[in-house]
Image: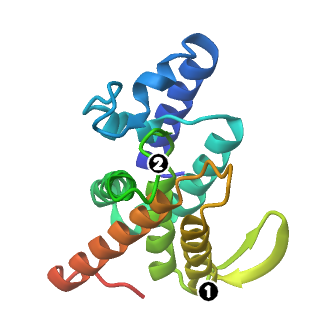
Amino acid sequence: MTDVVKHLLIINLIVFAFTELIFPNLIRVLALYYPTSPYFQPFQLVTHFFTHANLGHIFFNMFGLVMFGSPVESLWGPRRFLLFYIVCALGAAITQLLMMYFQIESTNGLMVGASGAIYGLLVAFGTKFPNAELMLIFLPIPIKAKYFIPGLIALDLFLGISKFSGDPVAHFAHLGGAFFGFLLILLWQNNDSNYRVN
């Protein structure tokens, strides 16, 4: 496990322990609300992506962080990796807030989780390791990253547009993290002669 990934993992676990075991109401302070909400605070743009709703939520996000983040950080180094992670997380928040503004998503909800940043890491992993084979836990069939990751993003787009009743997932935040990650990769590729994607 690489250094930044390890520190992000520790921060997420500490925040989760505090919100689950010590101060349960803290999650409502750290979660991201729509700016017109009386509960909105600017710091929530950052705190929300260190906060998780339940054990399953943090498990899958942290699993993704370790699995996809470590090889990407090994290639890019800690500073570029951390910048990428934060940009994707903020991009996810901005995208979700825009969906709320255009009334594609409800403005009454709140958002927590690092999923947007993880989707950015998925895009980075897919560009650097396109032929790596990945598997879903419930579908143990190896699929190359260059097919698996676009398929996962397409599924999120479908679910976001479909708006299934009772679906609590911020699908457009996932898409925003992936999109901002892709844009940043293109920017680095075009402006940095030392940066190349495979």
Quarter placement of the C terminus: bottom left
Q: Is residue 7 visible?
A: no
52 and 80: which is toward the camera: 52
Which of the 4 image quarters holds residue 55? Answer: top right
**Can you tell which mark lies on residue 191?**
none
Q: Position of residue 24 (x, y in %)?
A: 57, 16
146 and 172: which is toward the camera: 172
Q: Position of residue 115 (x, y in %)?
A: 52, 53
Which of the 4 image quarters holds residue 120? Answer: bottom left
Q: Amino acid at mark 1?
A: Tyr
Which of the 4 image quarters holds residue 16? Answer: top right
User: Which residue sits at x=61%, y=80%?
Assistant: 151
**Can you tell which mark lies on residue 147?**
1
- Tell me how far mark 2 sits from mark 1, CA to CA: 31 Å
**Crowdedness of circle 2 by 10 Å Cα count: few (<14), some, many (20+)?**
some
Residue 177, compared with residue 37, is above or below; it is below
Q: Amino acid at mark 2?
A: Ser
Tell me if 97 is positioned left or right of 141 in this view.
Answer: left
Tell me if 163 is positioned left or right of 194 in this view.
Answer: right
Q: Pointer 2: what residue? A: 106
Tell me if 64 is positioned left or right of 124 in this view.
Answer: right
